[in-house]
């Protein structure tokens, strides 16, 4: 049976739509909200208003560029959670309206599962079972993936996400939001061994990033007392050192997860997987340990509707639909 699915992503600050036909993603339209930049982080109220403004335009562009009419659609998919409630509500309500108007089924998608499923949009695709390190502004998880829709979180952060640690470190250095990509940029010309930071070690395969956030704040405060232009004088070295510290925390746990499960197919997903230090370290560790490493294209690392479309396709072929009474979930387990 031919399947034509329109997918909508609105969990945080990107409004995105994608069309997938018979399991092949045709496009991935993304409207990024710049309104948050001057506030140093995502402002939930502004995010939901921007989704309201963007969603019709983004959906129309996805349908038009795919050459698809609304009447061609077999189903509508949307991100149910996790995410910001006001943002999720826009996508969920829009999808419900289309489903009702077009009399076609609705498919709910878990955003974190979709980050993992992004690996199936393009080749090379990992073999099951594989491990996926999902790292974003809101999440840090090691996921054991048994099948497209059968996943288990085997390690996760007990407090902040690694993306938040990157962004907070950048913020205290006076860099604009989101600071993760800027740390990555300055780190390229820095000495990663210039400065050392303490590490909080959690039991099992879990992570903690709140300690490094505070330690970094005090480190800068103490250094600036000695030299007020410490950050300006050492920006590249500070960025390289903090990036290496965060990347090492991730890689250490990934190595332990691989040893514990015996799995050597290792993938990364989420916004922080765009980090060049993480990519390099993962490839080096992979070479040493004979891992098959999978890193998605940048476009599919950060929040996007193509990953929602891909996950929706696997639900569609299993006949997994939801009712019009479905509600968004700010927290949504697998
Ligand atoms: O997955 P994502 O787009 O949104 C969610 O949080 O769901 O991830 C955004 C996060 C931000 O914290 C951003 O600073 C971080 O990913 N990020 C990076 C890089 N690119 C994006 N962090 C470090 N290095 C990068 N190159
Ligand atoms: Zn995300």
Image (cartoon, helix red, strand yellow):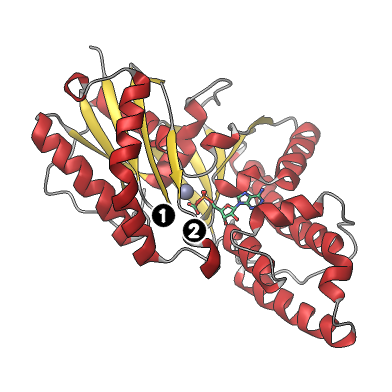
- Say which of 311 and 9 sits in front: 9
Asked if the residue under mark 1 is in contact with the one under mark 2, i.e. CB atoms within 8 Å, the reply is yes
Residue 130 shows in the view: yes
Quadrant showing the N terminus: top left
Q: Residues within 10 Å of mark 1 (few under 14, many from 20)?
A: many
Q: Residue 138 got which mark?
A: 2
- For residue 235, above or below residue 146: below
Q: Position of residue 185 (x, y in %)?
A: 75, 50
- Taking depth in this image into account, of 67 and 264 the one nearest to the observer is 67
Residue at 65% across / 61% down in the picture? 166
Residue drawn 52% across the image and 35% down it: 300
Q: Which mark is residue 210?
A: none
- Residue at the spot of label 1: 12
Task: Pinpoint residue 306: horizontal percent, then vertical percent.
Answer: 42, 32
Q: Secondary structure at mark 1?
A: loop
Pointer 2 residue Cβ closer than 8 Å to ligand 1: yes
Q: Nearer the viewer, residue 54 or 104?
A: 54
| Crowding at mark 2 (Cα within 10 Å: few <14, some 14-19, many 20+) | some
Side of 134 relative to 102 (left or right): right
Is 331 in front, or is 285? 331
Q: In the image, is 95 to the left or to the right of 45?
A: left
Helix, strand or loop for disc 2: loop
Q: Looking at the image, which residue is at 60% across and 72% down? A: 210
Q: Quadrant of residue 103?
A: top left
Q: Nearer the viewer, mark 2 or mark 1?
A: 1
Ranked by sequence position, the earlier of labels 2 and 1 is 1
**Which percent across, then down, holds residue 120?**
48, 26
Can you see residue 330?
no
Above or below — where is 144 with respect to 170?
Answer: above
Is the distance from the Cβ of mark 1 to the nearest ligand 1 atom less than 8 Å? yes
- Residue found at the far top of this picture: 1
């Amino acid at each position: 049976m031919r399947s034509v699915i329109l997918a909508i992503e609105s969990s945080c600050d990107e409004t995105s739509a994608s069309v997938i036909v018979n399991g092949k993603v045709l496009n991935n339209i993304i409207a990024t909200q710049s309104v948050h930049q001057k506030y140093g982080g995502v402002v939930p109220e502004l995010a939901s208003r921007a989704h309201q403004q963007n969603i019709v335009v983004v959906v129309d562009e996805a349908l038009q560029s795919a050459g698809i009419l609304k009447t061609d659609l077999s189903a509508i998919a949307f991100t149910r959670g996790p995410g910001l409630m006001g943002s999720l509500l826009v996508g969920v309500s829009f999808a419900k309206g289309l489903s009702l108007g077009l009399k076609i089924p609705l498919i709910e998608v878990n955003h974190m599962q979709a980050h993992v499923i992004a690996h199936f949009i393009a080749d090379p695709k990992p073999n099951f079972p594989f491990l996926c390190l999902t790292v974003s502004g809101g999440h840090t998880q090691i996921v054991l993936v048994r099948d497209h829709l059968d996943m288990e979180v085997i390690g996760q952060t007990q407090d902040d996400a690694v993306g938040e640690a990157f962004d907070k470190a950048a913020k205290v250095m006076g860099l604009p939001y989101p600071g993760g990509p800027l740390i990555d940029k300055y780190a390229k010309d820095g000495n990663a061994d210039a400065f050392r930071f303490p590490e909080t070690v959690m039991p099992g395969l879990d992570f903690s990033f709140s300690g490094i956030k505070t330690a970094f704040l005090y480190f800068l405060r103490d250094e600036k007392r000695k030299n007020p232009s410490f950050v300006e004088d050492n920006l590249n070295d500070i960025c390289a050192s903090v990036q290496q510290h965060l990347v090492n925390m991730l890689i250490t746990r990934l190595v332990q997860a691989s040893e514990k499960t015996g799995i050597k197919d290792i993938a990364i997903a989420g916004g922080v997987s765009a980090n060049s230090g993480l990519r390099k370290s993962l490839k080096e560790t992979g070479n040493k340990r004979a891992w098959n490493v999978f890193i998605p294209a940048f476009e599919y690392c950060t929040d996007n509707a193509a990953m929602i479309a891909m996950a929706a396709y696997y639900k569609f072929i299993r006949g997994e639909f939801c009712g019009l009474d479905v509600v968004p979930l700010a927290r949504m387990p697998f």
